[in-house]
Amino acid sequence: MPHYPLGPICTAASIHLAAASPNFSRLEELNTGAHGFTNDPKFYPVQPKLDGSRYPVLDTPGLGVEVNEALAQKNEFIPVEIPRLRKNDGSFANR
């Protein structure tokens, strides 16, 4: 089960991976916009959308995600660093 990838581009890639995997079961996901601009439709006007409890596999070119490049170039898009656990020595930890 892929862990939620925190964005529409990674979500689309995970959907395609799922479609190609015979033993795929679930894709974890968070609410839209849970991390600021992560899924904001003004930055990603075309992106995967749930159809009930499932994501359809799109038949559009590439992954099926469009990025508003003009808006992204205006420096309004602020990458969000997700919270991470660290050990005393600065390395990352799972818990």
Image (cartoon, rainbow, N blue to C red):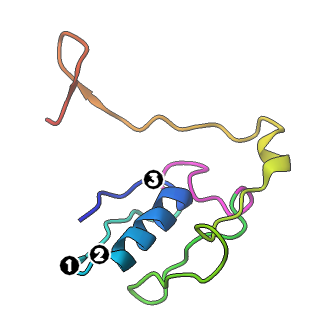
Q: Which residue is labeled 3 in the image?
A: 6
Do the residues under discs 1 and 2 have CB atoms within 8 angstroms? yes
Determine the secondary structure under disc 1. loop
Residue density around tag 1, few if under 14, some if 14–19, many if 20 or more, within 10 Å: few
Q: Secondary structure at mark 2?
A: loop
**Is 15 left, or right, of 79 in this rendering?**
left
Q: Earlier in the sequence, mark 3 or mark 1?
A: 3
Q: Is residue 35 magenta?
A: yes
User: Residue 88's mark?
Assistant: none
Q: Nearer the viewer, mark 2 or mark 3?
A: 2
- Residue assigned mark 1: 23
Q: Tell me if residue 27 can be seen.
A: yes
Q: Nearer the viewer, residue 95 or 46?
A: 46
Q: Secondary structure at mark 3?
A: loop
- The structure residue drawn at horizontal position 36% and vertical position 76%, both measured from the top left corner, is 20
- Amino acid type indicated by mark 2: Ser
Image height of 39 relative to 23, above or below: above
State the separation of the CA atoms marked 1 and 2.
Answer: 6 Å
Q: Which residue is mark 2?
A: 21
Front: mark 3 or 1: 1
By secondary structure, the bulk of the magenta-drawn segment is best described as: loop
